[in-house]
Amino acid sequence: MTIRAAVIGWPIAHSRSPLIHGHWLRRYGIDGSYERIAVAPEDAPRFFAELPGSGLAGCNVTVPHKEAALAACARVEPAAEAIGAVNTLWIERGELCGTNTDAIGFLANLDDRAEGWDRDPGVAVVLGAGGAARAIAWGLIGRGFTVRLVNRTLARAEELARRFGSGTTAHGWPDLPGLLGDSRLLVNTTSLGMAGKGDLEIDLSPLPGDVLVTDAVYVPLETPLLAAARARGLRTVDGLGMLLHQAVPGFERWFGLRPTVTPELRDIILADIEGRAP
Ligand code: ATR
């Protein structure tokens, strides 16, 4: 019988998850499907309540339903609890279970593309304090980093820092130059640098020469931040791998096989971003 999974959101047409899971289903010859389902915010509680009997093995959850998905679960993994959001759902003994794979997606991308990046963890500067920052900061704390959260709205960063406790500090943008000098890692989680959004204009000169710079934004693949870092000779990792790696645990849950993130998959998604044939 065909195993069915999906991604839900509102809107959902832009989601690239069907491309990722569709590629793996073909590559591994699995009798499965992965569809987009548009779920309006007011319909989300009913969607989650009916999911265990719906015939779907589970689904990915994207904006704006990640918090509602957490609330709807009978059981969640510690990552989802800590991040305060669920992006992957499955059914176990008739009950809705959830986790959040954004942190492991972020970490796996760096493990894959910047070998040894966490060998000597120290200070990580995280720009932003939204959902992505929350997942990434939690992941970095787990790898032994001290996280400095820098956000336009200081109160949001302070709220996150309180949540993660000692070692995590909150700062406003004007503090940034003084926060970079001893950092091992600089991560952008804001929407700045994304095609069509504002530019992230920061002076990278205080960064040490052995820092790693990475961006959660992957459209464009090389954001102005990454381009500026590369021009300075700094090590950089783009954000596309985070999208690819966060999809791995869901696929494994639903379809029973742990998929691999390959250059071929990366090119399929990149081709879609760039509007060309893979
Ligand atoms: P996500 O879940 O993708 O992290 P989000 O929760 O909407 O999305 O968070 C967006 C982040 O980008 C926030 O840190 C936001 O800063 P505020 O908390 O001050 O809103 C940041 N951001 C968005 N536009 C920005 C801008 N023009 N300048 C600075 N920061 C911006």
Image: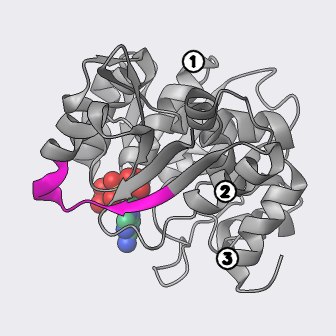
- Find the magenta span and give its range: 35-44
- x and y percentages locating residue 65 in the rendered image: 27, 49
Query: Which quadrant holds the N terminus?
Result: top right
Q: Secondary structure at mark 2?
A: helix
Q: Residue at x 57, y 52 (%)?
A: 33
* Mark 2 beta carbon near ligand 1 (under 8 Å): no
Residue nearest the observer in this picture, 92 or 153: 92
Where is mark 1, residue-wise? 142
Which of the two marks, 3 or 2, is nearer to us in this view? 2
Q: Secondary structure at mark 1?
A: helix
Q: Amino acid at mark 2?
A: Gly
Query: Which quadrant holds the C terminus?
Result: bottom right
Disc ID at residue 244: none
Q: Residue furthest left?
A: 42
Which of the two marks, 1 or 3, is nearer to us in this view? 3
Q: Residues within 10 Å of mark 3 (few under 14, many from 20)?
A: some
Q: Is residue 181 visible?
A: no
- N-term mark: 1 or 3: 1
Where is mark 3, residue-wise? 273
Q: Which quadrant does ligand 1 occupy?
A: bottom left
- Residue 234 vs 179, above or below: the answer is below
Q: Residue at x 81, y 21 (%)?
A: 119
Q: Residue at x 78, y 20 (%)?
A: 120
Q: Say whether marks 1 and 3 touch (CB < 8 Å).
A: no
Q: Quadrant of residue 143?
A: top right
